[in-house]
Image (cartoon, grey):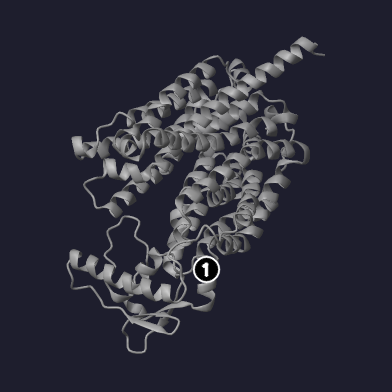
Amino acid sequence: MATLAEQQDRRWSMKRVIAASSAGTAFEWYDFFIFGALAQTISKVFFAGLEPTAALIAALGLFAAGFAFRPLGAIIFGVIGDRLGRKGAFLMTVSLMGGATFLIGLLPTYETAGILAPVLLIFLRILQGIALGGEYGGAAIYVAEHAQAEKRGAATGWIQSSASFGLLAALLVILGTRTAIGEEAFAEWGWRVPFLVSLILLIVSLWLRLKLSESPEFAKLKEEGEICHTPLREAFTQRENVKRVLIAFFGIMCAQGAVWYSTFFYSQVFLGRSLGVPEPTVNMLLIVMTVISAPLYVFFGWLSDRVGRKPVLIGGMLLALALYIPGFHAIAGAANPALVEAQRSTPVAVATDPATCSIQFDPVGTARFSSACDIAKSLLVTRGISYDTTRSPDERTYVLVGQQRLAIPAGDALSDAELKSLKGDVGKQIGLALEAAGYPKAADTRTMNLPLMIAVLLGFVVAATAVYGPQAAALVEMFPTRVRYTAMSLPYHVGTGWVGGFLPVTSFALVAITGDIYASLWYPLFFTGLSAIVAILFLRETRGKRLADV
């Protein structure tokens, strides 16, 4: 029986483990998110040789590259963590992330270094993705292997909440810097400040983590001489481990990527691009969502300690499935009621020869979209207008806005400059027709139902935190200590990095392809539904399980 002093010392030790692990993970998320938040500025500073649209696409593509390299980081640091220890692995990840972020703040611009500037930026961004790929698994495992079995969900819930703290810190540092020095100075040199601040956060994180000892589970494994020297082979060739990896990916991570990124990322695209909500309002909503989400991760982790991981995870998935379609419709009605009414009373259609139409999706910014059909659809998609496609009786292309019919000329034989001018002229004609039919240029903040918008968005926040809160404990409890770091990290980062990271661009692609702003929901519906089915059928309850028994 432990004495009172021993119990107090154990509680203090656990708090220190949680604080050091969560702070380091929040810092890594901060580093990762400031890049996305500064995409517009990055495009002007490092891709000045491109025209504005292509430059922004390049910056957003570079943001996505960080997600693409996360699974590689999971493999590299998973092997290190399983062979050399948890502490060493996540000391490396936080150092790599902090160093890469700090160096971005020192990079020369395109104006001073030419093509070398974006090349160096790409290299550092890849390092960021690799570092984050190794961070999450190490921090979650380290906390879980210290925590008591009956409190593991609540303890690891702090790791989950670190994403919120990191995102909030990124938004506040950027906003504070902009406010303090002004937009002109921020565009010239102030954008470097959020990156350079990461050096202070790195020093604090390293100081906290250096005071920690190795996790008891790994220390015991090392003492018994049971360290796995081939974790990749053991994790991904042994039948039982492969089965666990597949259940983790399809039963948990597909939903986590779909629900979390729909809530915190695609909602911004939907509000801003499809509904015309002003950026300051979108930022305000995101900050409210982020602040409220932080304690919910810990709450749902705690709840999973009481009722089980499986019911909480599945509950979050089912809530998201129930909310997707009615929720986004409700958000549209609350954010831009004039647009919703115009679409109901005066629907838009493109009458054309379908054979002349391309898929309205261009992630690399190289397509010209020069046929009459392409010009019509690309202009409507750019404005976030839903439309139907019908066959034209004379094979010419028309945009139909109620009773108005606008003939759209083709631009196949035009130069790039002439095509740009043509699209500008046609865009003005379509804009006038839409305005005459009651379509607003942007959402009117005076007519917004902000309480309803916040209420619906918070419903998604509850779903996202219910899936994400108990996730770390559930994943840790699925895999044996010998290969836990490697086996857990890869499905996590493929799910959240690929399914989640590419959700915004893929969802918007569905809008562009179909002409329906709600078609974007099929992507998260599919992956969330897939995880719900797999979790119900195959996910085992692991609440309270001794990690040594896995």
Residue 73 at least partly seen: no
Q: Nearer the viewer, residue 356 or 205?
A: 205
Give the left or right position of residue 272, taking residue 538 as reference: left
Residue plotted at (35% across, 68% down): 379
Could you tell me the amino acid type at mark 1? Answer: Ala
Q: Quadrant of residue 241?
A: top right
Q: Is residue 241 left or right of residue 4?
A: left
Quadrant position of residue 299: top right
Foreground pick, 531 / 323: 323
Residue 529 location (% of width, % of height): 62, 57
- Residue at the spot of label 1: 338
Q: Residue furthest front?
A: 446
- 331 vs 6, nearest the viewer: 331
Which residue occupies the extreme bottom position in the image? Answer: 393
- Label 1 Cα crowd, 10 Å radius (few <14 / some 14-19 / many 20+): many
Q: For the C terminus, which image quadrant?
A: top right
267 w.r.t. 106: above or below: below
Across and down, in percent, residue 172 comes to: 48, 35
- Based on the displayed image, in which of its 4 quarters is residue 407 positioned? bottom left
Place of residue 214 in the rendered image (x, y in percent of width and height, measured from the top left): 58, 18
- Which quadrant is home to the N terminus? top right
Q: Residue at point 47% right, 31% down?
A: 28
Q: Is residue 21 left or right of residue 417?
A: right
Residue 186 shows up from this direction: yes
In percent of width and height, residue 7 lies at 76, 15
